[in-house]
Amino acid sequence: MKNFLAAQGYKIMASKVFQDNKNAIRMKIDGRNSCTGNLRHVDIRYFFVKDRVDRTEIEISYCPTEAILADFFTKLLQGTLFRLLDK
């Protein structure tokens, strides 16, 4: 679909992915050299995302955990965060 739209003359922008883990962002941008040797289990998914970052198809940006809406549906909420979404 992306190639088709580009052939039709539409400008395709890079997709933005928000991440709240700074070490994961650094690993995706700098590669395995920025991490310790304990990352042997990271294999196919790592190279897929790293390849897309290198091709500038996706852009990874830092976003604090409190601002990522999907985390509210997967993590336990306490105190002010619960009251914020209860409204």
Image (cartoon, rainbow, N blue to C red):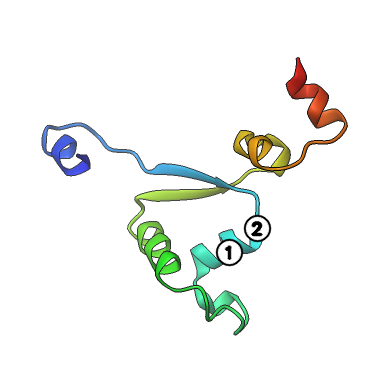
Per the rendering, the mark at residue 22 is: 2
Is the residue marked by circle 1 packed among few (<14), some (14-19), or many (20+) residues within 10 Å? Answer: some
- How many angstroms separate mark 1 from mark 2 (CA)? 6 Å
Q: What residue occupies the far bottom of the structure in this picture?
A: 37
Give x and y (percent) for residue 45.
43, 64
Residue appearing at x 55%, y 67% in the figure: 27
Q: Amino acid at mark 1?
A: Arg
Q: Are circles 1 and 2 on residues that touch, CB within 8 Å?
A: yes
Camera-side residue: 49 or 53?
49
Is the residue marked by circle 2 packed among few (<14), some (14-19), or many (20+) residues within 10 Å? Answer: few
Relative to 19, 8 lies left or right: left
Per the rendering, the mark at residue 26 is: 1
Q: What residue occupies the far top of the structure in this picture?
A: 87
Q: Where, by quadrant of the figure, is residue 79 drawn?
A: top right
Residue appearing at x 42%, y 60% in the figure: 49
Q: Say which element carries label 2.
A: helix
